[in-house]
Image (tube, helix red, strand yellow):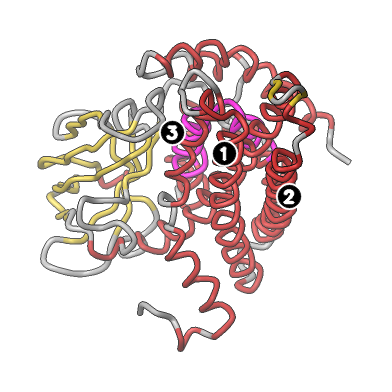
Amino acid sequence: MIASDQKQLLADVESFCQEIRPHEELCYVEHRFNDRVVPVARKYNLLGMPVPVEYGGRGANTVTYARALARIGREGTGVRTFFSGHTSIGEYPILTWGNEEQKRRYLPAACRGEKVLAFGLTEPEAGSNPLEMQTTYERRGDYYVLNGVKYLISNGGIADAAIGFAYPKGGGRISAFIVDRGEGFVSEDLTAKMGMPSANTAMFELRDCKVPVANLLGKEGEGFRIAMGTLVSGRLSVAAGCLGVIEDCLNEVLVYAKERNQHGKPIAKHQLIQEHIAGIEMARVASDALIERAAAAKDASNAAPADAELRAQADLLAAQAKMFAASAAWEAADRAVQVFGGRGWSTLYRVGRHLMDVRVCRIYEGTEEILKLKVAAALLGKEYEAYK
Protein backbone atom coordinates (compact mmCIF):
# COMPACT_ATOMS: atom_id res chain seq x y z
CA MET A 1 0.00 0.00 0.00
CA ILE A 2 1.23 3.49 -0.86
CA ALA A 3 0.52 6.13 1.79
CA SER A 4 -1.75 9.00 0.77
CA ASP A 5 1.06 11.55 0.97
CA GLN A 6 3.21 9.40 -1.34
CA LYS A 7 0.29 9.06 -3.77
CA GLN A 8 -0.09 12.83 -3.77
CA LEU A 9 3.61 13.22 -4.50
CA LEU A 10 3.35 10.93 -7.53
CA ALA A 11 0.28 12.85 -8.68
CA ASP A 12 2.26 16.09 -8.41
CA VAL A 13 5.09 14.50 -10.40
CA GLU A 14 2.58 13.60 -13.11
CA SER A 15 1.34 17.21 -13.24
CA PHE A 16 4.92 18.47 -13.43
CA CYS A 17 5.72 16.11 -16.29
CA GLN A 18 2.69 17.15 -18.29
CA GLU A 19 3.51 20.83 -17.83
CA ILE A 20 7.24 20.55 -18.53
CA ARG A 21 6.92 18.45 -21.71
CA PRO A 22 6.17 21.26 -24.20
CA HIS A 23 9.00 23.35 -22.76
CA GLU A 24 11.41 20.42 -22.98
CA GLU A 25 10.35 19.61 -26.56
CA LEU A 26 11.04 23.18 -27.67
CA CYS A 27 14.30 23.60 -25.75
CA TYR A 28 15.62 20.31 -27.09
CA VAL A 29 15.14 21.12 -30.76
CA GLU A 30 16.52 24.63 -30.17
CA HIS A 31 19.50 23.20 -28.26
CA ARG A 32 19.15 25.47 -25.26
CA PHE A 33 18.90 25.08 -21.51
CA ASN A 34 15.41 24.40 -20.17
CA ASP A 35 15.07 27.19 -17.64
CA ARG A 36 11.51 26.14 -16.76
CA VAL A 37 12.47 22.95 -14.90
CA VAL A 38 13.22 24.68 -11.60
CA PRO A 39 10.21 27.02 -11.49
CA VAL A 40 7.75 24.30 -12.55
CA ALA A 41 9.28 21.85 -10.06
CA ARG A 42 8.98 24.55 -7.39
CA LYS A 43 5.32 25.01 -8.30
CA TYR A 44 4.63 21.35 -7.50
CA ASN A 45 7.03 21.22 -4.53
CA LEU A 46 9.31 18.59 -6.09
CA LEU A 47 12.74 20.01 -5.29
CA GLY A 48 13.22 17.95 -2.14
CA MET A 49 11.16 14.82 -2.67
CA PRO A 50 13.11 12.49 -0.32
CA VAL A 51 14.05 15.26 2.14
CA PRO A 52 12.18 15.04 5.48
CA VAL A 53 9.28 17.45 5.94
CA GLU A 54 11.07 19.16 8.85
CA TYR A 55 13.69 20.41 6.39
CA GLY A 56 11.16 21.49 3.77
CA GLY A 57 10.91 18.31 1.69
CA ARG A 58 8.16 15.80 0.95
CA GLY A 59 9.53 12.93 3.03
CA ALA A 60 9.36 10.33 0.25
CA ASN A 61 10.90 6.94 0.90
CA THR A 62 13.37 5.57 -1.63
CA VAL A 63 10.83 3.35 -3.38
CA THR A 64 8.45 6.26 -3.98
CA TYR A 65 11.28 8.59 -5.00
CA ALA A 66 12.50 6.00 -7.53
CA ARG A 67 9.01 5.79 -9.01
CA ALA A 68 8.91 9.58 -9.24
CA LEU A 69 12.26 9.67 -11.05
CA ALA A 70 11.12 6.94 -13.43
CA ARG A 71 8.14 9.08 -14.39
CA ILE A 72 10.37 12.13 -14.80
CA GLY A 73 12.79 10.03 -16.86
CA ARG A 74 10.08 9.57 -19.47
CA GLU A 75 10.33 13.30 -20.17
CA GLY A 76 14.02 12.98 -20.95
CA THR A 77 17.32 12.10 -19.36
CA GLY A 78 18.20 15.79 -19.22
CA VAL A 79 15.18 16.63 -17.06
CA ARG A 80 15.82 13.69 -14.75
CA THR A 81 19.53 14.51 -14.53
CA PHE A 82 18.69 17.87 -12.98
CA PHE A 83 16.88 16.09 -10.13
CA SER A 84 19.71 13.61 -9.70
CA GLY A 85 22.25 16.42 -9.43
CA HIS A 86 20.15 18.64 -7.18
CA THR A 87 18.53 16.05 -4.93
CA SER A 88 20.08 12.57 -5.18
CA ILE A 89 23.70 13.72 -4.95
CA GLY A 90 23.25 17.36 -3.89
CA GLU A 91 20.81 17.33 -0.98
CA TYR A 92 21.53 13.73 0.00
CA PRO A 93 25.08 14.19 1.36
CA ILE A 94 24.01 17.26 3.36
CA LEU A 95 21.08 15.34 4.80
CA THR A 96 23.21 12.28 5.56
CA TRP A 97 26.51 13.75 6.75
CA GLY A 98 25.71 17.39 7.43
CA ASN A 99 25.33 18.79 10.93
CA GLU A 100 22.09 20.36 12.05
CA GLU A 101 23.19 23.90 11.22
CA GLN A 102 24.18 22.85 7.68
CA LYS A 103 20.88 21.05 7.17
CA ARG A 104 18.91 24.09 8.31
CA ARG A 105 20.98 26.46 6.18
CA TYR A 106 20.87 24.54 2.90
CA LEU A 107 18.04 22.01 2.72
CA PRO A 108 14.95 24.26 3.12
CA ALA A 109 16.39 26.73 0.60
CA ALA A 110 17.16 23.88 -1.82
CA CYS A 111 13.66 22.46 -1.41
CA ARG A 112 12.19 25.88 -2.17
CA GLY A 113 14.36 26.24 -5.28
CA GLU A 114 16.27 29.17 -3.81
CA LYS A 115 19.50 27.19 -3.97
CA VAL A 116 20.34 24.79 -6.79
CA LEU A 117 22.87 22.13 -5.77
CA ALA A 118 25.50 20.09 -7.61
CA PHE A 119 28.05 17.38 -6.81
CA GLY A 120 31.66 18.13 -7.71
CA LEU A 121 33.68 14.92 -7.69
CA THR A 122 34.81 14.27 -11.28
CA GLU A 123 37.90 16.04 -12.60
CA PRO A 124 39.65 16.08 -16.00
CA GLU A 125 42.15 13.46 -14.76
CA ALA A 126 39.96 11.77 -12.14
CA GLY A 127 36.92 9.91 -13.42
CA SER A 128 36.50 6.25 -12.53
CA ASN A 129 39.21 6.67 -9.89
CA PRO A 130 38.35 9.75 -7.81
CA LEU A 131 41.42 9.14 -5.66
CA GLU A 132 43.42 10.66 -8.53
CA MET A 133 41.79 14.05 -8.05
CA GLN A 134 44.11 17.04 -7.96
CA THR A 135 41.96 19.60 -6.13
CA THR A 136 43.59 20.67 -2.86
CA TYR A 137 42.66 22.60 0.26
CA GLU A 138 44.48 24.22 3.15
CA ARG A 139 43.27 25.77 6.39
CA ARG A 140 43.76 29.51 6.81
CA GLY A 141 42.16 30.71 10.01
CA ASP A 142 38.37 30.44 9.79
CA TYR A 143 38.47 29.30 6.15
CA TYR A 144 39.63 26.49 3.97
CA VAL A 145 41.10 27.63 0.66
CA LEU A 146 40.37 25.29 -2.28
CA ASN A 147 42.11 25.13 -5.65
CA GLY A 148 41.27 22.80 -8.53
CA VAL A 149 38.96 22.01 -11.44
CA LYS A 150 35.80 19.90 -11.47
CA TYR A 151 34.61 18.59 -14.82
CA LEU A 152 31.38 17.32 -16.42
CA ILE A 153 29.29 18.43 -13.45
CA SER A 154 25.50 18.22 -13.79
CA ASN A 155 23.99 21.59 -12.74
CA GLY A 156 27.55 22.91 -12.42
CA GLY A 157 26.79 26.12 -14.30
CA ILE A 158 23.56 26.92 -12.46
CA ALA A 159 24.42 25.67 -8.97
CA ASP A 160 24.38 28.08 -6.05
CA ALA A 161 26.39 25.57 -4.03
CA ALA A 162 28.25 22.35 -4.80
CA ILE A 163 29.48 19.44 -2.74
CA GLY A 164 33.22 19.63 -3.41
CA PHE A 165 36.02 17.20 -2.65
CA ALA A 166 39.72 17.91 -2.18
CA TYR A 167 42.97 16.59 -0.74
CA PRO A 168 44.75 18.50 2.02
CA LYS A 169 47.70 20.39 0.56
CA GLY A 170 50.82 18.45 1.42
CA GLY A 171 49.11 15.07 1.59
CA GLY A 172 46.42 13.24 3.49
CA ARG A 173 42.90 11.96 2.93
CA ILE A 174 40.11 13.55 0.89
CA SER A 175 37.64 15.83 2.67
CA ALA A 176 34.21 17.07 1.59
CA PHE A 177 32.93 20.66 1.63
CA ILE A 178 29.80 22.63 0.84
CA VAL A 179 31.14 25.23 -1.57
CA ASP A 180 29.03 28.32 -2.21
CA ARG A 181 29.21 30.09 -5.55
CA GLY A 182 31.03 33.36 -5.15
CA GLU A 183 34.51 34.79 -5.44
CA GLY A 184 36.91 32.06 -6.51
CA PHE A 185 34.16 29.85 -7.98
CA VAL A 186 34.22 30.17 -11.79
CA SER A 187 32.10 27.95 -14.03
CA GLU A 188 31.87 27.34 -17.76
CA ASP A 189 29.00 25.53 -19.45
CA LEU A 190 29.94 22.51 -21.59
CA THR A 191 27.73 22.50 -24.67
CA ALA A 192 29.77 20.25 -27.00
CA LYS A 193 28.11 17.05 -25.80
CA MET A 194 26.26 14.28 -27.63
CA GLY A 195 22.91 14.65 -25.90
CA MET A 196 20.95 16.43 -23.18
CA PRO A 197 21.20 19.91 -24.78
CA SER A 198 18.44 21.19 -22.50
CA ALA A 199 20.31 20.20 -19.32
CA ASN A 200 23.17 22.10 -17.74
CA THR A 201 26.56 20.41 -17.72
CA ALA A 202 29.59 22.46 -16.75
CA MET A 203 33.10 22.56 -15.41
CA PHE A 204 34.03 24.83 -12.56
CA GLU A 205 37.34 26.02 -11.25
CA LEU A 206 38.08 26.84 -7.64
CA ARG A 207 40.70 29.60 -7.57
CA ASP A 208 41.76 30.30 -4.00
CA CYS A 209 38.10 29.73 -3.18
CA LYS A 210 37.38 30.46 0.47
CA VAL A 211 35.12 27.96 2.20
CA PRO A 212 34.17 28.66 5.83
CA VAL A 213 35.31 26.05 8.33
CA ALA A 214 31.61 25.66 9.15
CA ASN A 215 31.10 24.25 5.64
CA LEU A 216 33.27 21.18 6.16
CA LEU A 217 30.94 18.22 5.49
CA GLY A 218 31.49 15.46 8.01
CA LYS A 219 35.01 15.30 9.43
CA GLU A 220 38.31 15.96 7.71
CA GLY A 221 39.44 12.84 5.87
CA GLU A 222 35.91 11.45 5.42
CA GLY A 223 35.44 12.78 1.89
CA PHE A 224 35.96 9.52 0.02
CA ARG A 225 33.47 7.69 2.26
CA ILE A 226 30.95 10.49 1.76
CA ALA A 227 31.46 10.43 -2.02
CA MET A 228 31.04 6.66 -2.29
CA GLY A 229 27.99 6.67 -0.02
CA THR A 230 26.41 9.44 -2.08
CA LEU A 231 26.96 7.48 -5.29
CA VAL A 232 24.60 4.78 -4.01
CA SER A 233 21.83 7.37 -4.07
CA GLY A 234 23.04 8.72 -7.40
CA ARG A 235 23.16 5.32 -9.07
CA LEU A 236 19.63 4.50 -7.98
CA SER A 237 18.44 7.79 -9.44
CA VAL A 238 20.10 7.03 -12.79
CA ALA A 239 18.61 3.53 -12.85
CA ALA A 240 15.13 4.89 -12.15
CA GLY A 241 15.49 7.51 -14.88
CA CYS A 242 16.57 4.81 -17.33
CA LEU A 243 13.42 2.86 -16.52
CA GLY A 244 11.45 5.94 -17.50
CA VAL A 245 13.30 6.09 -20.82
CA ILE A 246 12.37 2.46 -21.51
CA GLU A 247 8.74 3.14 -20.61
CA ASP A 248 8.54 6.12 -22.94
CA CYS A 249 10.21 4.24 -25.79
CA LEU A 250 7.66 1.45 -25.36
CA ASN A 251 4.76 3.89 -25.40
CA GLU A 252 6.08 5.58 -28.52
CA VAL A 253 6.63 2.37 -30.52
CA LEU A 254 3.24 0.93 -29.58
CA VAL A 255 1.50 3.97 -31.00
CA TYR A 256 3.75 4.36 -34.04
CA ALA A 257 3.74 0.67 -35.04
CA LYS A 258 -0.06 0.69 -35.21
CA GLU A 259 -0.19 3.90 -37.26
CA ARG A 260 2.66 3.28 -39.71
CA ASN A 261 1.74 1.19 -42.76
CA GLN A 262 4.23 -0.61 -45.00
CA HIS A 263 3.69 -3.52 -47.39
CA GLY A 264 -0.06 -3.06 -47.13
CA LYS A 265 -0.48 -3.39 -43.36
CA PRO A 266 0.51 -1.73 -40.08
CA ILE A 267 4.11 -2.51 -39.23
CA ALA A 268 2.83 -3.76 -35.86
CA LYS A 269 1.81 -6.91 -37.75
CA HIS A 270 5.36 -7.55 -38.92
CA GLN A 271 7.05 -10.22 -36.84
CA LEU A 272 10.44 -8.51 -36.65
CA ILE A 273 8.79 -5.32 -35.38
CA GLN A 274 7.08 -7.40 -32.71
CA GLU A 275 10.49 -8.80 -31.77
CA HIS A 276 11.69 -5.25 -31.04
CA ILE A 277 8.58 -4.48 -29.02
CA ALA A 278 8.99 -7.65 -26.98
CA GLY A 279 12.63 -6.79 -26.36
CA ILE A 280 11.73 -3.33 -25.05
CA GLU A 281 9.06 -4.82 -22.78
CA MET A 282 11.50 -7.33 -21.32
CA ALA A 283 13.97 -4.52 -20.66
CA ARG A 284 11.19 -2.66 -18.85
CA VAL A 285 10.02 -5.47 -16.58
CA ALA A 286 13.55 -6.58 -15.69
CA SER A 287 14.72 -3.04 -14.91
CA ASP A 288 11.59 -2.33 -12.90
CA ALA A 289 12.12 -5.41 -10.73
CA LEU A 290 15.81 -4.65 -10.08
CA ILE A 291 15.14 -1.00 -9.23
CA GLU A 292 12.27 -1.85 -6.88
CA ARG A 293 14.50 -4.33 -5.05
CA ALA A 294 17.41 -1.89 -4.84
CA ALA A 295 15.18 0.93 -3.59
CA ALA A 296 13.67 -1.32 -0.91
CA ALA A 297 17.20 -2.29 0.18
CA LYS A 298 18.15 1.39 0.45
CA ASP A 299 15.10 2.06 2.60
CA ALA A 300 16.07 -0.86 4.85
CA SER A 301 19.61 0.49 5.13
CA ASN A 302 18.37 4.00 5.88
CA ALA A 303 16.27 2.60 8.72
CA ALA A 304 19.33 0.92 10.27
CA PRO A 305 22.35 3.08 9.31
CA ALA A 306 24.68 1.22 11.66
CA ASP A 307 24.04 -2.12 9.98
CA ALA A 308 27.05 -2.70 7.70
CA GLU A 309 25.48 -5.74 6.02
CA LEU A 310 22.36 -3.83 4.98
CA ARG A 311 24.52 -0.95 3.78
CA ALA A 312 26.65 -3.26 1.65
CA GLN A 313 23.54 -4.93 0.23
CA ALA A 314 22.03 -1.57 -0.73
CA ASP A 315 25.32 -0.51 -2.34
CA LEU A 316 25.56 -3.67 -4.43
CA LEU A 317 21.93 -3.67 -5.53
CA ALA A 318 22.14 -0.01 -6.57
CA ALA A 319 25.20 -0.82 -8.68
CA GLN A 320 23.44 -3.79 -10.27
CA ALA A 321 20.30 -1.80 -10.99
CA LYS A 322 22.22 1.09 -12.51
CA MET A 323 24.45 -1.12 -14.63
CA PHE A 324 21.55 -3.18 -15.98
CA ALA A 325 19.00 -0.39 -16.48
CA ALA A 326 21.46 1.93 -18.26
CA SER A 327 22.39 -0.77 -20.76
CA ALA A 328 18.76 -1.88 -21.12
CA ALA A 329 17.63 1.69 -21.79
CA TRP A 330 20.27 2.15 -24.46
CA GLU A 331 19.15 -1.07 -26.16
CA ALA A 332 15.47 -0.13 -25.81
CA ALA A 333 16.05 3.28 -27.38
CA ASP A 334 18.06 1.67 -30.19
CA ARG A 335 15.21 -0.78 -30.86
CA ALA A 336 12.69 2.07 -30.79
CA VAL A 337 14.70 4.04 -33.34
CA GLN A 338 14.78 0.94 -35.55
CA VAL A 339 11.00 0.63 -35.36
CA PHE A 340 10.65 4.30 -36.36
CA GLY A 341 13.07 3.81 -39.22
CA GLY A 342 14.25 7.02 -40.89
CA ARG A 343 12.02 9.11 -38.65
CA GLY A 344 13.74 7.69 -35.61
CA TRP A 345 17.02 9.19 -36.76
CA SER A 346 15.84 12.66 -35.84
CA THR A 347 15.61 14.74 -32.70
CA LEU A 348 12.12 15.75 -33.78
CA TYR A 349 10.99 12.35 -32.49
CA ARG A 350 11.24 11.32 -28.86
CA VAL A 351 12.93 7.98 -29.49
CA GLY A 352 15.83 9.63 -31.32
CA ARG A 353 16.34 12.03 -28.42
CA HIS A 354 16.25 9.17 -25.91
CA LEU A 355 18.93 7.30 -27.87
CA MET A 356 21.27 10.28 -27.82
CA ASP A 357 20.63 11.20 -24.19
CA VAL A 358 20.62 7.84 -22.45
CA ARG A 359 24.05 6.85 -23.76
CA VAL A 360 25.71 8.88 -21.01
CA CYS A 361 23.96 6.80 -18.36
CA ARG A 362 26.40 3.97 -19.10
CA ILE A 363 29.20 6.35 -18.08
CA TYR A 364 28.25 8.74 -15.28
CA GLU A 365 27.72 7.65 -11.67
CA GLY A 366 30.03 4.70 -12.32
CA THR A 367 30.93 3.35 -15.74
CA GLU A 368 29.55 0.03 -16.90
CA GLU A 369 33.02 -1.49 -16.59
CA ILE A 370 33.61 -0.29 -13.02
CA LEU A 371 30.20 -1.55 -11.92
CA LYS A 372 30.89 -4.96 -13.44
CA LEU A 373 34.08 -5.15 -11.37
CA LYS A 374 32.12 -4.15 -8.29
CA VAL A 375 29.55 -6.90 -8.85
CA ALA A 376 32.22 -9.51 -9.55
CA ALA A 377 34.24 -8.53 -6.45
CA ALA A 378 31.11 -8.90 -4.32
CA LEU A 379 30.88 -12.51 -5.50
CA LEU A 380 34.59 -13.35 -5.42
CA GLY A 381 35.54 -11.55 -2.22
CA LYS A 382 37.50 -8.38 -1.43
CA GLU A 383 40.83 -10.08 -1.95
CA TYR A 384 39.97 -10.36 -5.65
CA GLU A 385 39.14 -6.67 -6.20
CA ALA A 386 40.67 -5.46 -9.46
CA TYR A 387 41.63 -2.12 -7.95
CA LYS A 388 42.88 -1.61 -4.41
User: For residue 290, what is the image quadrant?
Assistant: bottom right
The residue pinned by badge 2 equals: 282
Q: Position of residue 15 (x, y in %)?
A: 68, 16
- Between the C-alphas of marks 2 and 1, the distance is 13 Å
> Which mark sits nearer the N-terminus, 3 or 1?
3
Question: What residue lies at 54% left-to-right and 52% top-to-bottom?
Answer: 327
Tell me which amino acid carries mark 2. Answer: Met
Can residue 104 be seen here? The reply is no
Q: Residue furthest front?
A: 263
Marks 2 and 3 in Cβ contact (< 8 Å): no
In this view, the residue in front, 188 or 289, is: 289
Q: Position of residue 265 (x, y in %)?
A: 77, 24
The residue pinned by badge 3 equals: 106
Question: What residue lies at 76% left-to-right and 41% top-to-bottom?
Answer: 271
> Which mark sits nearer the N-terminus, 2 or 1?
2
The residue pinned by badge 1 equals: 333
- Residue depth check, mark 3 versus mark 1: number of the one nearer the observer: 1
User: For residue 339, what is the image quadrant?
Assistant: top right
- In the image, which residues are magenta? 67-91
> Which mark sits nearer the N-terminus, 2 or 3?
3
Marks 3 and 1 in Cβ contact (< 8 Å): no
- Between the C-alphas of marks 3 and 1, the distance is 37 Å
